[in-house]
């Protein structure tokens, strides 16, 4: 019944959108509202005025960028923003792009792209566009900057070298690294992990569990939802992790680390301190890290603590499972509520195929907000509009992207990972992030399972239980009672269909 209602709603919205599209008269000025994630730059108005002076002349259109903090965006995304009568919106696989597309939030793009975005279509290529399809329909345009966001550990290399410790490339070596620093300087903070704000992955409750990506060659970096998982080389062969001996062993390792004082005993109630590592309060970060965040810390150290050195090891360097971000990691959709879908595509096509406009949107006004040095590198002139000040990662185009000196180091990391990814069974293919789960039929059970993860799994993964075996049995009982099997059955059926469709066997 829920699926039928979703289909009916999508059909109604589709018919409404078709009527609006027919009314998109070029003589009528189109004021396009574009929702993006993050804080607005101080010089937002000046850059928008410069953009709109061009768009008004070319397309009788303007753009109003609407900003939202990361927290607010996550809270509002599925409800307020999508139904707010806007035109364009930032989308991502980690923001339920596929599910929202299935539920009728976004317009189908193929016809619009053929008619009003031929240059953009050619720039994307069929391969990238096909990765953005949901049930065969195209609902977003991907960003066009190939990026590796592989999970890993960011750590203080200067301390590793100073105390002659092993590189933290395996769980055993990570433990030795932390213990070595602890022994040499007991006052030094080690890790600052926290309870996850949501159990959206339905596989973790405490963020040190990201470390499992250093141990297992899983197709999903830290396990599939509902305690299921599969290896990258055999993705269709799903097996149980939560009810395995490995799970118990891992929970006992986490308890050992907690007992050794690797993190605070109040970690379950601590709020995440995003600056702890950069301020020297932690010697490593193990959750949610990626090469870009490593570069950010390296820059911070160079500026504020030149005697420190930050380094990065991707977990896939140990497991052999490494691949780039999926095409839907950063994308742009046209909301079905838009009155001006044609103008949306015209403007999107122009922003992503015209170098001058793309640089204006991404970096501001040349000579006022930035300049290029003798090596062609970007130099900021005014912090009121920083690099990519509009947070429009979804509009990145590799050929137009202004490079910074740190991009040399970042590209070296990307080249390294690309070479490793070429050696996998599916060379540099991001299998997991191409999958969209539709949990409409078991949403109540899914929510209940998420609550159990926060209450019972998080303490296990934080090592803050007195008896691991007893706590594991309690967690297993509670998660089963919450409706785990209904979730698993629905997920496994969809995953099997996905693997069969793309021949991931």
Image (cartoon, rainbow, N blue to C red):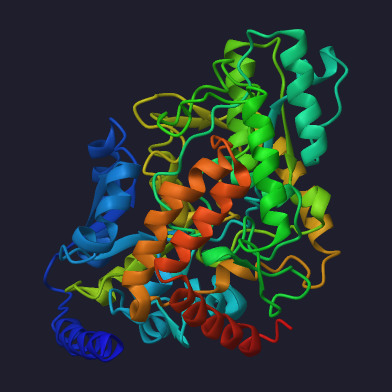
Task: Tell me: 418 left or right of 50.
Answer: right
Q: Quadrant of the C terminus?
A: bottom right
Q: Quadrant of residue 114?
A: bottom left
Residue 356 appears in the figure: no
Q: Position of residue 172 (x, y in %)?
A: 81, 37
Residue drawn 49% across the image and 45% down it: 458
Q: Nearer the viewer, residue 407 or 284?
A: 284
Q: Is 159 rendered above or below residue 51?
A: above
Residue drawn 42% across the image and 28% down it: 270
Q: Quadrant of the N terminus?
A: bottom left
Task: Tell me: 1 left or right of 384.
Answer: left
Residue 391 appears in the figure: yes
Q: Position of residue 157 (x, y in %)?
A: 76, 23
Q: Position of residue 57 (x, y in %)?
A: 24, 60
Q: Is 343 rendered above or below residue 367?
A: below
Q: Nearer the viewer, residue 49 or 198?
A: 198
Q: Nearer the viewer, residue 77 or 487?
A: 487
Q: Position of residue 170 (x, y in %)?
A: 80, 41
Numbered marks: total: 0
Q: Is 472 rendered above or below residue 295?
A: below
Q: Quadrant of residue 422?
A: bottom right
Residue drawn 26% across the image and 92% down it: 4
Residue drawn 34% across the image and 27% down it: 384
Q: Nearer the viewer, residue 464 or 84?
A: 464
Q: Is 189 rendered above or below residue 96?
A: above
């Amino acid at each position: 019944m829920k699926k039928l209602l979703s289909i009916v709603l999508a059909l109604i919205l589709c018919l409404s959108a078709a009527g609006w599209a027919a009314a998109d008269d070029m003589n009528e000025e189109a004021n396009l509202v574009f929702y993006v994630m993050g804080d607005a730059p101080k010089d937002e108005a000046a850059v928008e005025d410069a953009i709109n002076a061009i768009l008004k002349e070319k397309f009788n259109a303007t753009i109003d960028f609407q900003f939202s903090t990361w927290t607010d965006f996550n809270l509002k995304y599925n409800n307020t923003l999508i139904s707010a009568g806007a035109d364009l919106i930032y989308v991502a696989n980690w923001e339920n792009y596929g599910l929202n597309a299935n539920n009728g939030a976004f317009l189908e793009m193929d016809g619009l792209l053929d008619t009003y975005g031929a240059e953009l279509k050619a720039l994307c290529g069929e391969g990238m566009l096909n990765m953005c399809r949901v049930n065969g329909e195209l609902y977003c345009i991907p960003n066009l900057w190939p990026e590796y966001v592989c999970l890993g550990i960011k750590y203080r290399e200067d301390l590793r070298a100073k105390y002659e410790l092993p590189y933290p490339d395996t769980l055993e070596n990570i433990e030795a690294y932390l213990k070595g620093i602890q022994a040499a300087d007991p006052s030094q903070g080690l890790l600052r992990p926290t309870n996850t704000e949501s159990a959206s992955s339905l596989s973790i409750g405490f963020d040190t569990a990201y470390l499992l990506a250093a141990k297992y060659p899983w197709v999903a970096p830290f396990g599939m939802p509902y305690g299921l998982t599969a290896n990258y080389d055999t993705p269709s062969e799903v097996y149980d992790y939560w009810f395995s001996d490995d799970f118990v062993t891992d929970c006992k390792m986490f308890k050992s680390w907690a007992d050794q004082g690797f993190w605070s005993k109040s970690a379950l109630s601590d709020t995440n301190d995003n600056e702890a590592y950069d301020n020297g309060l932690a010697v490593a970060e193990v959750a949610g890290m990626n090469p870009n965040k490593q570069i950010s810390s390296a820059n911070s150290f160079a500026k504020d603590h030149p005697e420190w050195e930050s380094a990065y090891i991707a977990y896939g360097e140990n497991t052999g499972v490494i691949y780039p971000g999926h095409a839907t990691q950063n994308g742009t959709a046209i909301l079905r509520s838009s009155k001006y879908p044609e103008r949306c595509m015209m403007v999107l096509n122009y922003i992503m195929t015209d170098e001058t406009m793309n640089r204006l949107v991404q970096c501001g006004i040349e000579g006022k907000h930035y300049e290029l040095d003798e090596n062609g590198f970007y130099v900021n002139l005014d912090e009121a509009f920083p690099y990519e000040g509009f947070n429009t990662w979804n509009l990145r185009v590799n050929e137009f992207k202004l490079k910074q000196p740190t991009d040399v180091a970042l590209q070296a990391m990307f080249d390294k990972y690309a070479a490793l990814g070429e050696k996998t069974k599916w060379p540099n293919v991001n299998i997991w992030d191409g999958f969209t789960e539709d949990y409409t039929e078991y949403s109540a059970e899914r929510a209940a399972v998420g609550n159990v993860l926060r209450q019972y799994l998080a303490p296990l993964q934080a090592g803050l239980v007195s008896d691991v075996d007893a706590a594991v049995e309690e967690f297993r009982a509670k998660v089963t009672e919450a409706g785990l099997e209904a979730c698993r059955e629905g997920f496994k059926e969809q995953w099997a269909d996905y693997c069969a469709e793309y021949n991931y066997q």
